[in-house]
Image: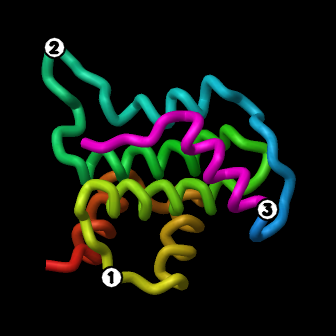
Amino acid sequence: MIMLSIEDVLLIAKKLIERFGGTFGIRDKGLLESSLNNAFQTFDGEELYKTDVEKIAVISYSIIRNHPLIDGNKRLGISVLLILCKLNNIILEYTREGAVDLAIRIAEGSIDIEDVVEWIKKHEKK
């Protein structure tokens, strides 16, 4: 899977704040690192998240739920989801409203990682 570095993610976050407003800053760098690394966890030598779609869902979900930045966590989580899908040849057809709704539902805790996986699969262009 093609992955983004923490530096890439912070640059994306900064650009989002510049474009849409808010305060750029890292609330907890460890939480951001954890958000990016959670998708690659193993147990007893087996990956917990085997597919690229699962990994992307975990990363996006973790960024939004862990709240590692001062501002813009939902925007960043969804932007990272969309960028990682594109980098990994997962072409999505979605509306802006649908992506915003996904971010809000993740932030509220009304959906889980499996729901994010299903959202990606549902919007994947076949």
Which residue, as the protein is rendered here, is positioned at the far right?
23
- Image quarter of residue 125: bottom left
Q: Amino acid at mark 1?
A: Glu
Q: Amino acid at mark 3?
A: Glu
Which mark is nearer the camera, 3 or 1?
3
Q: Residues within 10 Å of mark 2 (few under 14, many from 20)?
A: few
Q: Could you tell whether 5 is left or right of 32 in the image?
A: left
Residue linked to disc 2: 44
Which mark is nearer the camera, 2 or 3?
3
Which residue, as the protein is rendered here, is positioned at the far top?
44
Q: Kindly report the distance in space between the C-alpha atoms of the residues bearing marks 3 and 1.
A: 26 Å
Using the image, determine if residue 18 lies above or below residue 96. above
| Tag 1 secondary structure | loop
Q: Residue at x 44, y 42 (%)?
A: 4
Q: Is residue 111 magenta?
A: no
Q: Residue at x 23, y 48 (%)?
A: 52
Q: Position of residue 1 (x, y in %)?
A: 25, 42
Using the image, determine if residue 122 lies above or below residue 109. below
- Magenta residue span: 1-17
Residue linked to disc 1: 93
Q: Position of residue 102 (x, y in %)?
A: 49, 69
- Kindly indicate whether the residue at mark 2 contacts the one at mark 1 (C-beta within 8 angstroms): no
The image's colour scheme reads rainbow
Label 2 vs 3, first from the N-terminus? 3
- Kindly indicate whether the residue at mark 1 contacts the one at mark 3 (C-beta within 8 angstroms): no
Q: Could you tell whether 42 is left or right of 56 in the image?
A: left
| Tag 3 secondary structure | helix
Q: Position of residue 34 (x, y in %)?
A: 51, 28
Any mark on residue 18, and which?
Answer: 3
| Tag 2 secondary structure | loop
